[in-house]
């Protein structure tokens, strides 16, 4: 590590004499990003980063300053104090436990021990596997990171973390001369390179390409209200985007959430149980948030009732609750409320049971993005592909299918949950910041869903 722990502890002692609260984050890291586009390596970025920030609270106002030169930590602390002295606000922090801990996320193969050449070969293998007939473009993105950070505050918390994360994303475009269709998938986790090693790369690449090719022969989707089944990926996207952001307490405080004043009210059917869990083995894993709060499996929606929110110490203080441990940011940014691994709990139905009673419905798979208005509680998502469900059987492949509606109505129309479970690998953007997250769930049956298509 590049920082001096004794120096930081002494600095905390010095600063706390001038302010009501202070915390410091400092650390170093290394990472690699590789981009391959249409059979050519376009980017290889690798390097080491260092940084430290000081955050102080005085008279209810934050002062925040960052440097990537750790020798200037005392200098930036003076800047943070000066900023807080110039402001007045009403910030009150919720109480938090004093923690002294040292943690290391599990890994079998450190990503830094794997050569750039080996990583490139894996990317080329995925590209080669996806190079099927009708495929006109392939993009592969690989990213990994290792970081060693320390968090200290004037309350006595001292946490040292050693974290690692790795992921690979594949996009395939196919065309038959008239239509263009896209396949997408990803693999990764908050662990070492074994995540990539344990993946059947040939199968991974081929399956994505076959999805894109299959869509070229698919029919245009109908529009209207249908009973639907969403796969693990689309279930996760719906829970993350349509519900997850709405339970972020800063948005509730900004009056930008349909769930404001809905605590302990029924917002979904009684089989709906939703969690945000930073502790689980998924891409959004972390043991402590960026305010040093210990994370836990947060039961957000219990049997359809909203029973918890996602919060930081600041937002929890304003709402009179305890922080959920969802303050997240890079060292250079102010912590804000973010999701971690957000998912719908599985049920006990097989896929065949989910579709057997559907006479005329649609099965939606994968996600191609969408839009959400958390204040109005409305959403629209585009599925990667879909199939008609006719008399309990999957039949005609469909393309260009969207799912839209009001999140509260949609959650209340969930009447069947599969016994399977899967989370996806992704990054979530908010207020100009990006955080690694996981989202997922089981295959999910929803009645009276609004489906959009070109027919």
Image: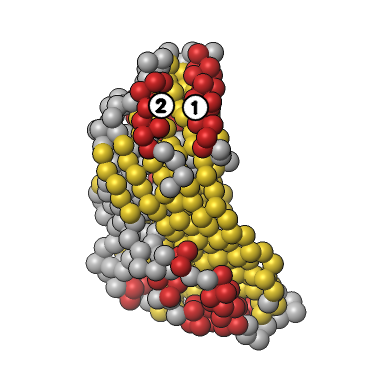
Q: Position of residue 120 (x, y in %)?
A: 58, 73
Q: Secondary structure at mark 2?
A: helix
Residue 50 in sight here: yes
Q: In this orientation, which residue lies closer to the viewer: 382 or 145?
A: 145
Residue in the picture at 62% in, 73% down? 172
Residue in the picture at 59% in, 59% down? 46
Residue in the picture at 60% in, 65% down? 34
Q: Is residue 145 left or right of residue 124?
A: left
Residue at the disc numbered 1: 74
Residue at the disc numbered 2: 11
Q: Quadrant of residue 357?
A: bottom left
User: Where 113 sits versus 292, above or below?
Assistant: below
Quick one: which residue is furthest to the right in this view? 177
Q: Secondary structure at mark 1?
A: helix
Q: Quadrant of residue 110?
A: bottom left
Q: Position of residue 190 (x, y in %)?
A: 40, 59
10 Å neighbourhood of mark 1: few (<14), some, or many (≥20)? some
CB atoms at circles 1 and 2 under 8 Å apart? Answer: yes
Q: Position of residue 17 (x, y in %)?
A: 37, 15
10 Å neighbourhood of mark 2: few (<14), some, or many (≥20)? some
Q: In this orientation, which residue lies closer to the viewer: 376 or 194?
A: 194
């Amino acid at each position: 590590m590049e920082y001096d722990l004794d120096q930081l502890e002494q600095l905390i002692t010095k600063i706390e004499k001038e302010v009501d609260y202070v915390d410091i984050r400092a650390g170093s890291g290394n990472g690699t990003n590789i981009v391959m586009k249409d059979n050519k390596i376009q980017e290889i970025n690798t390097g080491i980063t260092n940084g430290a920030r000081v955050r102080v609270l005085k008279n209810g106002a934050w002062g925040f300053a960052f440097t990537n030169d750790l020798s200037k930590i005392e200098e930036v602390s003076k800047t943070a104090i000066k900023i807080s002295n110039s402001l007045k606000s009403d910030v009150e922090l919720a109480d938090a436990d004093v923690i002294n801990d040292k943690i290391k996320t599990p890994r079998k193969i450190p990503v830094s021990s794997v050569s750039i050449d080996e990583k490139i070969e894996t990317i080329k293998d995925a590209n080669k596997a996806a190079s099927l007939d009708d495929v006109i473009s392939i993009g592969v993105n690989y990213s990994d990171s290792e970081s060693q950070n320390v968090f200290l505050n004037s309350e006595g918390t001292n946490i040292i973390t050693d974290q690692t994360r790795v992921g690979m994303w594949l996009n395939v475009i196919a065309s038959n001369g008239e239509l263009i269709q896209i396949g997408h998938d990803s693999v990764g986790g908050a662990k070492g390179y074994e995540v990539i090693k344990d993946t059947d790369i040939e199968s991974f690449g081929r399956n994505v390409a076959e999805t894109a090719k299959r869509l070229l022969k698919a029919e245009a989707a109908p529009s209207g209200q249908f009973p639907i089944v969403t796969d693990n990926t689309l279930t996760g996207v719906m829970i993350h985007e349509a519900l997850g952001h709405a339970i972020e307490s800063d948005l509730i405080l900004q009056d930008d959430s349909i769930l404001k004043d809905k605590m302990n009210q029924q917002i979904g059917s009684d089989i709906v149980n939703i969690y945000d869990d930073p502790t689980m083995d998924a891409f959004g894993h972390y043991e402590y948030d960026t305010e040093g709060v210990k994370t836990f499996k947060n039961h957000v929606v219990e049997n359809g009732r909203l029973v918890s929110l996602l919060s930081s110490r600041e937002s929890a203080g304003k709402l009179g609750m305890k922080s959920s441990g969802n303050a997240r940011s890079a060292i250079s940014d102010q912590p804000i409320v973010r999701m971690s691994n957000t998912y719908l709990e599985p049920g006990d139905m097989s896929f065949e049971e989910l579709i057997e009673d559907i006479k005329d419905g649609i099965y939606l798979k994968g996600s191609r993005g969408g839009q959400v208005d958390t204040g109005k509680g409305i959403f629209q998502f585009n599925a990667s592909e879909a199939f008609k469900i006719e008399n309990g059987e999957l039949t005609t492949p469909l393309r260009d299918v969207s799912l839209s509606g009001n999140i509260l109505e949609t959650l209340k129309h969930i009447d069947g949950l599969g016994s399977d479970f899967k989370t996806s690998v992704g990054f979530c953007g908010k207020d100009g910041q990006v955080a690694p997250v996981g989202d997922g769930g089981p295959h999910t049956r929803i009645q009276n869903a609004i489906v959009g298509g070109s027919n």
